[in-house]
Amino acid sequence: MRVITLNLNGIRSAFSKGFPTWLSRQRADVICLQEIKAQAADMTAKMINPPGYYGYFHYAQKKGYSGVGIYARQRPDRVIEGLGIKDIDAEGRYIELVFGTLSVVSVYLPSGSSGEHRQAEKFRFMKRFYPHLVKLTRSGREVILCGDWNIAHREIDLRNWKSNQKNSGFLPEERAWMTRVLDGLGWIDVYRRLCPDATGEGYTWWSNRGQARAKNVGWRIDYQIASAGIAATAREATIYKSRRFSDHAPLSIDFDWNL
């Protein structure tokens, strides 16, 4: 089973840059999308259901903002849109597909980089999302949580870690929360398990400022975080950088698992 995650920074923009052609060649079983920046009325038939896939989405109420989705080769047994928390769900940040004993989630954590107000909202999201992560660990299902978490967990996960210690995305509180998720709850950062020493080749996001992508001044903030059972079956991880669909790069992981 191949799972891909990508923050599109606008589905219409990504489709205009060749994303569907690339996707058709990936032989992926599940593709998790974040920041689609569209409402249902904005979506074309191919955006909703690319050839060979069924599409499921949780749109933000605000136009041109946030939103998550999942493409899957087979229909899920259940679709869960949102966390059941009104203000979070209004921003379209969570969708879960259930396939028997496996759940695949596309999640988009808030960014706090635009100011103190949004950073406070990010911390509120993290506080309220944690109990849901606890619930998932106790569900009895295997789970893959794909998405843009807007947090670089360790120094190895970004180029300029020293100068970013007081910036959103690498704050001590954010990093400690990620440690609680991983070490405290037993979730596995699958890419880091497969590539324990990877530095620059592991980056998935680059600022649009100062030729950051050309210079590979990047961050690893896009993850596939999984329960221990399915994480143990992961065998290969790839970050595609040859062509640019977004300010993020797709992260693909192959699991020895049948959907």
Image (tube, rainbow, N blue to C red):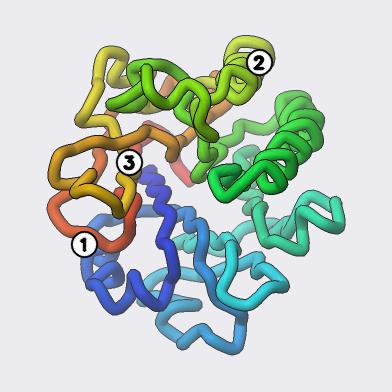
Q: Position of residue 215 (x, y in %)?
A: 14, 39
Q: Position of residue 81 (x, y in %)?
A: 73, 59
Reading the chain from its start, which is encountered first: label 2 or label 3?
2
Q: Secondary structure at mark 2?
A: helix
Q: Nearer the viewer, residue 31 or 241?
A: 241
Relative height, residue 219 to residue 37 (above, below): above
Reading the chain from its start, which is encountered first: label 1 or label 3?
1
Which quadrant of the figure contains the N terminus?
Answer: top left
Give how far apart the Cα atoms at labels 2 and 1 are: 37 Å
Please tell me which residue is depicted at 54% across the width and 37% down the height of the picture.
Answer: 144
Query: From this viewpoint, is residue 104 visible?
Result: no
Residue type at tag 2: Arg
Q: Are marks 2 and 3 in contact (CB under 8 Å)?
A: no
Q: Which residue is mark 1?
A: 25
Q: Secondary structure at mark 3?
A: loop
- Residue 204 is labelled as 3
Please tell me which residue is depicted at 58% across the width and 17% down the height of the picture.
Answer: 172
Q: Secondary structure at mark 1?
A: loop
Residue type at tag 1: Arg
Residue type at tag 3: Thr
Dividing the picture into quarters, in which one does residue 124 lie?
top right
- Residue 180 is labelled as 2
Q: Nearer the viewer, residue 179 or 124?
A: 124
Q: Is residue 44 left or right of residue 114?
A: left
Give how far apart the Cα atoms at labels 2 and 3 are: 22 Å
